[in-house]
Structures are given as C-alpha cells and as structure tokens.
Image (cartoon, helix red, strand yellow):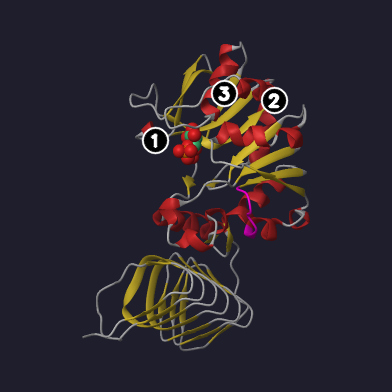
C-alpha cells in the first residue's frame, strides 16, 4: 500500500522550553530562519506525502495559522484535536477518521533528523511490514523507546527501560499499516499514564505482525530544551544555500556561509558562517557567528553573538563580551552597558526588556 498520508504530532507542551514556549508552541520555534514544523513539512512533501493530519491540543491557533491548508507545501492539511495529552498512541486514535484504512507515516513534530523519508517509506513498502520504526544508536537509551533486533527484524520494544535491551533508541518517525489502530485499542496506559505507541507496536508483534527497523546514522535531535534547538539550528544552517541579498559594507568581513536577507544592512561587522540574517535587519559594529540565526526586523549593534537564535523584531545593543549559546524570542530588547567583558548566556521569551547597568 503506497504511503501518501502522514500525521504530525504537535500536542506536546514543551515545558522544558519555557519561557520560550509560553507564547509559541515548540513546533513553531524558529530554527535557521523558519519554524521547525516548516522543515518537517518540506521533508514530508519531498517524500511524496499528499495529505497531512496535524494533531494539536484544543484551541490551538498558531499552528493552524502557519500550516493553513498545506498548499504552501503542495499538500492538503487537516487538523485533528487531541483533547488530553494521553500519549502518542492516543493521538493516533484521535486521527482515526483521517487515517481511514490507509497506511501512514507518523512524525513527532519536535524532531529534526537527517534521513530521506522517501527512502524510509520505500523500504517499508518493499518489506511488507506492519510497522517500520526509525532507530538510532545512542549511548544512553533509557529516556527513549528501545528496540531489540533478531534476524534483521524487531523482536521486542520497550518504552524508557531502566535496563535497555540494546542501544537502539526509537526516533520519532514511524510508518504503519492500519492494523496499528486495532493494536492501539488493546493496550493499557503505561506507568506514566500514557497510551504508548511503543506498547502498541509490541502488541502488533504479539499478534504475529512484522515490525522492521531502519537505522539512522545521521543527525537526530528532539527539541526538548534550548540546547537542542541550538543544535537543530546549526544542523539546518549547514544545509541551507545561503546567499547575500542585503548590503554588507566594505569595512565588514565575512568568512564561511553567510545569508543576508533583502533590506538588511551590515555595517562594520565581522561575520563568520554559518550565519543567517532575515530581512530588514540592521547589524552594526558587531562580531556575529558562527551558528547564528537572526530573524527579520532585528537590530544588533556593538555585540558579539555566537551560537544563538534571535527571533524577529529583537534588538541587542552593547554586549562586547558577547552573547553565546542563547535563544532570544521575538520583540525582545537587550541593552548592555557596553562594559561587560564576559560572555552572557540567556534564554529570553518574547517581548522581554533587559538592561544591564554596569553598577
Ligand atoms: C517518545 C516515544 C519514544 C521515542 C521518543 C523520541 O518519547 O515515546 O519511544 O523514543 O519519543 O523522541 P517522549 O518524547 O514522549 O518521552
């Protein structure tokens, strides 16, 4: 059965991304110039997905506004509500009408990974499996679902095992035949009170189903906390075709891959790539990059920035000691006193105002 449908799970709360996630769902956090969800939709579209079901909590608006009808990615989008956060398998159940009797791909909306989803789907289609999970070798798999392999197939799965049977963690991308829905109906909640998709896949196995795993060797990160977002930002920055559309004056220097948006002016700056700046921003007397992503309508003057995400409409002035490893939300004002020679690390939510006095 050809896989043309996907669900993206966007119901998680993002508590470890607070305060950033108070005003923006974690799936819409900006990485390398666009929301994480935008990167996911691009990957699904490239893999030939035609219909996407986006699963959100009740009363969610920002995600609907961003994805709209899906046409920007050449897909049709449907919204499905998970009334309570009762687990990944429960989320799939909430998508039952949308899924109908079709095979589908399931993508956890906070995951970024280096894997052609088209290849993953092709392998699933060829294998005639009931489910294929993406897995990756990790040093400590105890915080993930873990698979145990036998003769090239999955022989068992367990969620967050204290004593893992292997180092193969389940990455947040799966492909299923519709039989998974019956398996979901037969599982009980786990110790953390959730209907686990891992348990439902184990149920498929117990029913005599065939489960395969595809090992991912490249990048994988789920955006649980700010350092994860910064790693995802760097990952996509490295893959972007960056180009200069704005103005960089002669007294500025550039090194590595630099992207400067339309209407942005760079004056007397040292830029080191990868570094991407959006449109209509002003950068002056600053030392910026590597691994920096700055949004639209920002202003950075007299500052050093390394490994940072700065979102739209934010102003940073007088930080010669530098701002490092930081995520700064929208319309923030960070005013330094120009004296501090030590780097500062900040995680600042939207619309905050911070001034240092130097006293
Ligand atoms: C979920 C899954 C787990 C998987 C992980 C990947 O865990 O239950 O099997 O390894 O996503 O990100 P959660 O993020 O709900 O703890």
Query: Of the residues under marks 2 and 1, which one precedes in the sequence?
Result: 1
The total of numbered circles placed on residues is: 3
Q: Position of residue 40 (x, y in %)?
A: 62, 49
Q: Which mark is residue 200?
A: 3
306 left or right of 313 in image: left
Q: Is residue 328 magenta?
A: no
Q: Is disc 1 surrounded by few (<14), some (14 to 19) or many (20+) residues within 10 Å? A: few
Element class at badge 3: helix
Tell whether label 1 touches label 2 (CB within 8 Å): no
Q: Which mark is residue 309?
A: none
Of the 4 image quadrants, the one containing the C terminus is bottom left
Instruction: Give whichever of 356, 265 is nearer the camera.
Output: 356
Tag in front: 1 or 3: 3
When the figure is inspected, residue 332 is found, relative to residue 226, above or below; the finding is below
Residue pointed to by mark 1: 143
Tag in front: 3 or 2: 3
Q: Position of residue 67 (x, y in %)?
A: 70, 56
Query: Of the residues under marks 3 and 2, which one precedes in the sequence?
Result: 2
194 left or right of 94 in image: left
Query: Which portion, as a residue range, is magenta?
Result: 57-62
Tell whether label 2 touches label 3 (CB within 8 Å): no
């Amino acid at each position: 059965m050809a896989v043309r449908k996907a669900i993206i799970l966007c119901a998680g709360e993002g508590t470890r991304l607070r305060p950033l996630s108070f005003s923006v769902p974690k799936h819409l956090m900006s990485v390398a110039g666009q929301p994480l969800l935008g990167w996911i939709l691009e990957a699904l579209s490239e893999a030939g997905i035609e219909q996407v079901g986006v699963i959100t909590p009740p009363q969610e608006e920002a995600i609907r506004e961003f994805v709209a009808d899906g046409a920007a990615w050449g897909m049709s989008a449907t919204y499905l509500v998970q009334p309570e956060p009762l687990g990944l398998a429960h989320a799939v159940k909430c998508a039952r009408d949308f899924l109908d009797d079709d095979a589908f791909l399931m993508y956890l909306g906070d995951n970024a990974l280096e894997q052609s989803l088209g290849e993953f789907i092709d392998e699933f289609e060829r294998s005639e499996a009931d489910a294929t999970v993406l897995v990756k070798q990790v040093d400590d798999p105890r915080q993930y679902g873990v698979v145990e392999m036998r003769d090239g197939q999955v022989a068992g799965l367990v969620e967050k095992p204290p004593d893992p049977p292997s180092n193969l963690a389940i990455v947040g991308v799966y492909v299923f035949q519709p039989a998974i829905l019956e398996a979901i109906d037969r599982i009980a909640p786990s110790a953390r009170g959730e209907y686990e998709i891992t348990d439902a896949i184990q149920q498929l196995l117990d029913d005599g189903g065939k489960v395969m795993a595809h090992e991912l060797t490249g990048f994988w990160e789920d955006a649980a906390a700010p350092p994860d977002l910064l790693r995802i930002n760097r990952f996509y920055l490295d893959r972007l075709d960056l180009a200069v559309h704005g103005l960089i004056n002669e007294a500025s220097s550039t090194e590595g891959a630099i992207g400067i948006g339309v209407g942005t002016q760079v004056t007397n700056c040292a830029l080191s790539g990868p570094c991407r700046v959006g449109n209509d921003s002003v950068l002056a007397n600053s030392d910026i990059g590597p691994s920096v992503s700055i949004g639209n309508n920002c202003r950075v003057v007299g500052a050093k920035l390394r490994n940072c995400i700065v979102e739209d409409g934010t102003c940073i002035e007088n930080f010669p000691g530098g701002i490092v490893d930081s995520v700064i939300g929208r319309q923030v004002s960070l005013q330094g006193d120009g004296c501090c020679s030590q780097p500062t690390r900040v995680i600042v939510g939207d619309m905050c105002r911070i001034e240092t006095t130097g006293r």
